[in-house]
Image (tube, grey):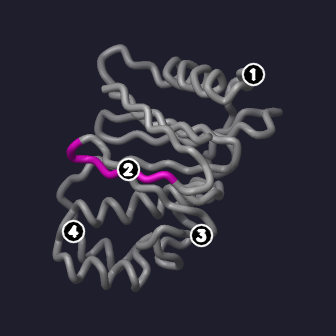
Amino acid sequence: MIALFVLKEEAGFCRAQALGRCTAEYCAMAGRAAPKNAPQKRPFGQPYFPGEAGLHLSLSHSGGLWCCALAPNPVGVDVERRRPVRVRALSARFFHPEEDALLLTHGDEPALFFDLWTGKEAALKRLGLGLGFGLPSFSAAGERALCGWLRRFDAPAGYSLCLCSQTSPNEEECRLIVRI
């Protein structure tokens, strides 16, 4: 089972406390013990629980939303607040030709741009790679990217949200838990 928590960062919101609550809730749902150690970071910033086989973590935040994905296998999540961007300039620089062509057919639509961007970031996070990996080298236009499966979710209005997992959407239950 994969759990994807989406919380609003309001006054007094503490990411460490939120992570602790989400991890405890996930472990209870999954029927496993909560981790004994606090999360650490790998070289490219990917969080992990030391000594906890079968408990993988990914975090993201943007524009007042905070997301946490927990799973038994490597997972990546990205959320982005949609905002005006120079779609053509960014697409030509950071996107795969397949994605660039798709954006050309939709004009300067920020929603599609951010749907693709969150897919790219989620795939890189699942593998523990940074943005310097080479964004134009792969496409996140379909349901697969970098040997992972993409799951796009209906995010709160004005946001794009994507999860990348090792298993296809039909193979593993994914629970979206929104607390806004």
Magenta range is: 157-163
Q: x and y percent of residue 17 in the render? A: 52, 17
* Residue underneath mark 1: 33
At horizontal 60% and vertical 63% (from top left) the residue drawn is 148
Residue lying at 37% horizontally and 31% vertically, measured from the top left: 178
User: Residue under circle 2?
Assistant: 153
Residue 35 located left or right of residue 131 = right
* Label 3 Cα crowd, 10 Å radius (few <14 / some 14-19 / many 20+): some
Q: Amino acid at mark 3?
A: Leu
Q: Nearer the viewer, mark 1 or mark 4?
A: 1
Tag 2 or tag 4, which sits nearer the N-term? Answer: 4
From what the image shows, is residue 24 above or below residue 143?
above
In the rendered structure, the answer to whether residue 139 lies left or right of residue 29 reads left
Q: CA distance from mark 2 to mark 1?
A: 28 Å
Residue 100 is situated, as x and y percent measured from the top left of the image, at: 33, 81
- Give coordinates of residue 149: x percent, y percent: 55, 62
Q: Looking at the image, is mark 2 or mark 3 earlier in the sequence? A: 3
Label pair 2/1, CB-CB below 8 angstroms: no
Q: Position of residue 79 (x, y in %)?
A: 39, 47
| Cα–Cα span, label 3 and label 1 | 31 Å
Q: Residue at x 71, y 37 (%)?
A: 55
Q: Please name the residue that numbered disc 4 is placed on.
A: 86
The Cα–Cα distance between marks 3 and 4, rounded to whole angstroms, is 26 Å
For residue 146, the mark is: 3
Q: Earlier in the sequence, mark 1 or mark 4?
A: 1
Could you tell me how far apart the alpha carbons at marks 2 and 3 are, in whole angstroms?
Answer: 19 Å
